[in-house]
Image (tube, helix red, strand yellow):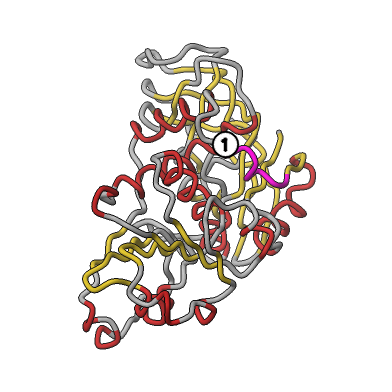
């Protein structure tokens, strides 16, 4: 069954093409897209042919890592949702002749049980942020906040901003940040915000129990080390291309490196509840929205404009 999709035809080449999905299996549903979003940190990698998972990429590649839509067909073994109901989906791998890592940027897509979450209500645009909030919840759960006095967040993109929101929801207020763009700093649930690490005076040395890295620049760990307490934690939440770090520049403080890249189904269920009850306000991070006909402009803004935190595409 053909479906128009946003496809990386080759490195750094974006296109809108009809692609074909495999037949629906018994444990799968077909979803008509209502809204999708652009996850800049992921798409920058995929656009150049680099994967953020173990999967090796070969072009062409269907983009997109999240979708809100209506179930228009279901396999005979699917019991969690009915045709006509709405879901949030985060993975579609049933494309023929094109590859995907998450593969959600299409007008219709197939997702199997476990890769979609029933909404049990009419969808809202902010539902495309369920995965983002789930990732932030997963990251914060890797910390024992009872033993933490102060946290520094490097990078106030969508994930850094959302992690700050989750920390505030948990009642943790001693959060500072480092962010180049003032527009993002103004959105943050953080106290002291600097434009660069060099702006932190010596008074901030050895101050932070945890430094959360959300920029995707692993080489920031060494210049940030002076701010970390001995044996403090680096929580790594970015996608990293260059992993080379000289251990001799870090070993004197014996920091712990904690990776956070995976959220569970339960995290997504919790995120859905927090969004629909307005317990955590992530809707304001949807700073830009476009009709699908303007997909090229949407990707340009999402990947290159600092004032864009998160962009959605309306199908």
Q: Is residue 53 left or right of residue 198?
A: left
Q: Position of residue 97 (x, y in %)?
A: 52, 48
The quadrant in which residue 72 appears is top right
| Residue at the image position 42 percent from the left and 74 percent from the top | 204
Say which of 118 and 207 sits in front: 207
Neighbourhood count class around disc 1 (C-alpha, 10 Å): few under 14, some 14–19, many 20 upward:
some
Location of the N terminus by quadrant is top right
Q: Position of residue 152 (x, y in %)?
A: 42, 63
Answer whether residue 265 is magenta in the image: no
| Residue at the image position 22 percent from the left and 82 percent from the top | 251
Q: Is residue 219 visible?
A: no
Q: Position of residue 308 (x, y in %)?
A: 68, 55
Residue 166 vertical position relative to residue 299 in the rendered view, above or below: above
Q: Which residues are magenta?
A: 281-288
Q: Position of residue 259 (x, y in %)?
A: 31, 59
Location of the C terminus by quadrant is top right
Total numbered labels: 1
Say which of 190 and 241 sits in front: 190
Secondary structure beneath dot 1 equals: loop
Residue 140 vertical position relative to residue 305 in the rendered view, above or below: above
Q: Is residue 224 visible?
A: yes
Q: Which residue is mark 1?
A: 281
| Residue at the image position 26 percent from the left and 67 percent from the top | 232
| Residue at the image position 39 percent from the left and 42 percent from the top | 137
């Amino acid at each position: 069954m053909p479906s128009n999709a946003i496809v990386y035809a080759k490195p750094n080449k974006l296109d809108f093409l009809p692609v074909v999905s495999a037949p629906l299996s018994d444990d799968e549903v077909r979803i008509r897209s209502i809204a999708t979003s652009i996850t800049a940190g992921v798409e920058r990698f995929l656009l150049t042919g680099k994967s953020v998972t173990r999967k090796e990429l070969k072009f062409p590649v269907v983009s997109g890592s999240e979708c809100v839509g209506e179930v228009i067909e279901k396999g005979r073994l699917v019991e969690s949702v009915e045709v006509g109901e709405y879901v949030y989906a985060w993975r579609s791998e049933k494309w023929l002749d094109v590859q995907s890592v998450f593969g959600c940027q299409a007008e219709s897509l197939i997702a199997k049980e476990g890769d979609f979450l029933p909404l049990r209500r009419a969808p809202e645009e902010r539902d495309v942020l369920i995965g983002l909030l789930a990732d932030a919840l997963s990251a914060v759960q890797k910390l024992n906040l009872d033993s933490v006095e102060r946290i520094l967040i490097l990078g106030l993109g969508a994930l850094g901003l959302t992690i700050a929101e989750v920390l505030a929801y948990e009642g943790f207020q001693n959060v500072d940040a480092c962010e180049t763009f003032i527009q993002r700093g103004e959105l943050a649930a953080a106290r002291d915000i600097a434009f660069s690490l060099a702006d932190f005076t010596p008074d901030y040395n050895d101050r932070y129990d945890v430094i959360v890295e959300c920029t995707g620049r692993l080489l920031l760990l060494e210049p940030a080390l002076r701010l970390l307490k001995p044996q403090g934690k680096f929580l790594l939440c970015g996608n990293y291309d260059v992993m080379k770090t000289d251990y001799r520049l870090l070993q004197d403080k014996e920091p712990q490196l904690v990776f956070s890249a995976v959220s569970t189904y339960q995290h997504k269920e919790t995120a859905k509840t927090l969004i629909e009850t307005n317990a955590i306000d992530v809707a304001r991070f949807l700073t830009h929205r476009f009709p699908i006909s303007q997909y090229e402009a949407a990707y340009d803004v999402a990947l290159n404009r600092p004032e864009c935190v998160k962009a959605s595409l309306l199908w």
